């Protein structure tokens, strides 16, 4: 079955009256994705289980107004700087900059009006399941220097892999860290928490954090700690350990440093998540150096989706591929500075290895 172009339908309006569109991508594998122009949100990602029963494996909200309100970034594209910048302060070439604080005195995910809250322009592909979103962030936006042009391509292939590819250019030196903030629950919304999911992360080191979630020291080896996910283990088993880092964050809200890629810019696996109850599995592959694992520690059951399924604590898990938190203030971390004449590129793939391989098209 050949890939088809995305389909658009209205998704209501934000409280300020701005219309929001929903774009649907479909794959021959049975996987489908729904993407909103508000915040570039991955609203649904429907995946069959081994028996062919399809459910969305990302947590969602019911309508455009809910996504426009304060919330936990469900499915959104976040920037200019994903994760945290300590105190919102950073310097580039000796010049100081300040972004507004929105999390314990620090700047989280680009500030209170980051990319998750913006309208994105959508351009569908004509002959395949792909949608390009674009955004112009002006000089000084949320305190970040430089006019930044960002492009994000969501693409769904015949095998059911959803790829998210980022590009950006700037006219002044700036800092940049982009990711998608989907909350995965492979059992589907309404199936409870993810404590029984098996998680494996391809990183031998992670960043310990202070109670305010800012990294406070050098990289730490995961060996001998609850952060040792070099072999798959139940999420609940890891979170049940007595460990000050888990107490600081209420669970996982930490960045793992991934093992080096085979070549600069090459994809390598970041994590594998599996749900024994549903039989679904997810592999995350990326060009980024880190993955922030967040176990939805702040969800409390008050938020729900359009079907009335409430999202409990640990009701999902985020696998946010990105550069390391507070990198603008940590010269020992990989640089997040983007300069005029350079092009930022990043790619992450969400693969579902439990799905059968696509059959080749018959000849003739």
Image (cartoon, rainbow, N blue to C red):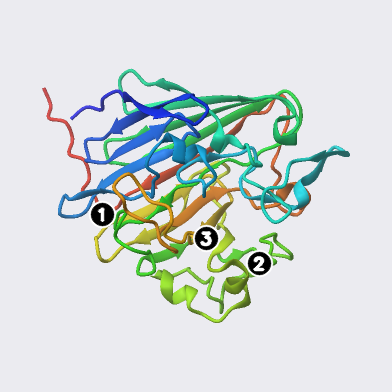
Crowd rating for badge 2 (residues with CA inside 10 Å; few <14, some 14–19, many 20+): many
Q: Which mark is residue 354?
A: 1
Height in image: 96 above or below 140? below
Pointer 3 or 2: first along the chain: 2
Percent across and percent down for residue 5 are 30, 23
Q: Are marks 3 and 1 in contact (CB under 8 Å)?
A: no
56 over 6 or under it: above or below: below
Q: Residue lying at the far right in this picture: please name it.
A: 94
Q: CA distance from mark 3 to mark 2?
A: 19 Å
The dot on residue 195 is none
Residue 311 lies in quadrant? bottom left
Residue at 43%, 76% in the rendered image: 237
Circle 3 SS class: loop
Measure how far apart labels 1 and 2 are at the Cα level.
Answer: 33 Å
Q: In terms of depth relative to the viewer, which is nearer, 278 or 104?
A: 104
**Which numbered disc flags the more N-terminal residue, 3 or 1?**
3
Q: Badge 1 local density, few (<14 within 10 Å), some, or many (20+)?
A: some
Q: Which residue is mark 3?
A: 298
The residue shown at (51%, 63%) is 297
Question: Which quadrant holds residue 144?
Answer: top right
């Amino acid at each position: 079955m050949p890939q088809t172009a995305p389909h658009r339908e209205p998704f209501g309006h934000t409280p300020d009256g701005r219309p929001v569109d929903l774009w649907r991508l479909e794959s021959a594998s049975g996987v489908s994705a729904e993407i909103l122009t508000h915040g570039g949100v991955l609203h649904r990602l429907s995946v069959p289980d081994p028996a062919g029963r399809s459910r969305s494996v990302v947590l969602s909200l019911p309508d455009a107004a809910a996504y426009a309100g304060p919330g936990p970034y469900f499915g959104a594209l976040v920037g200019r700087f994903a994760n945290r910048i300590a105190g919102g302060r950073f310097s580039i070439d000796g010049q100081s900059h300040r972004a507004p604080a929105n999390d314990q005195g620090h700047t989280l995910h680009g500030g209170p009006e980051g990319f998750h809250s913006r309208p994105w322009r959508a351009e569908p592909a004509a002959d395949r399941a792909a949608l390009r979103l674009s955004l112009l962030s002006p000089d000084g936006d949320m305190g970040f220097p430089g006019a930044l042009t960002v492009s994000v391509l969501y693409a769904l292939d015949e095998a059911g892999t959803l790829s998210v590819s980022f590009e950006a250019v700037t006219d002044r030196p700036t800092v940049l860290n982009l990711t998608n903030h989907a909350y995965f629950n492979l059992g589907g919304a309404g199936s409870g928490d993810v404590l029984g999911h098996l998680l494996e992360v391809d990183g031998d080191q992670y960043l310990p954090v202070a109670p305010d979630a800012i990294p406070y020291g050098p990289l730490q080896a995961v060996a001998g700690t609850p952060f040792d996910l070099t072999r798959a283990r139940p999420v609940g088993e890891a979170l049940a350990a007595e460990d000050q880092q888990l107490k600081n964050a209420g669970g996982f809200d930490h960045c793992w440093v991934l093992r080096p890629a085979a070549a600069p810019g090459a994809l390598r696996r970041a994590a594998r998540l599996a749900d024994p109850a549903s039989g679904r599995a997810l592999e995350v592959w990326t060009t980024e150096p880190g993955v922030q694992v967040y176990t939805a520690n702040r969800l409390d059951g008050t938020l729900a989706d359009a079907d009335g399924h409430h999202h409990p604590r640990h009701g999902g898990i985020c696998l946010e591929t990105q550069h390391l938190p507070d990198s603008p203030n940590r010269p020992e971390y990989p640089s997040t500075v983007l300069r005029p004449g350079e092009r930022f590129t990043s790619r992450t793939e969400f693969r579902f290895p439990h799905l059968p391989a696509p059959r080749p098209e018959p000849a003739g």
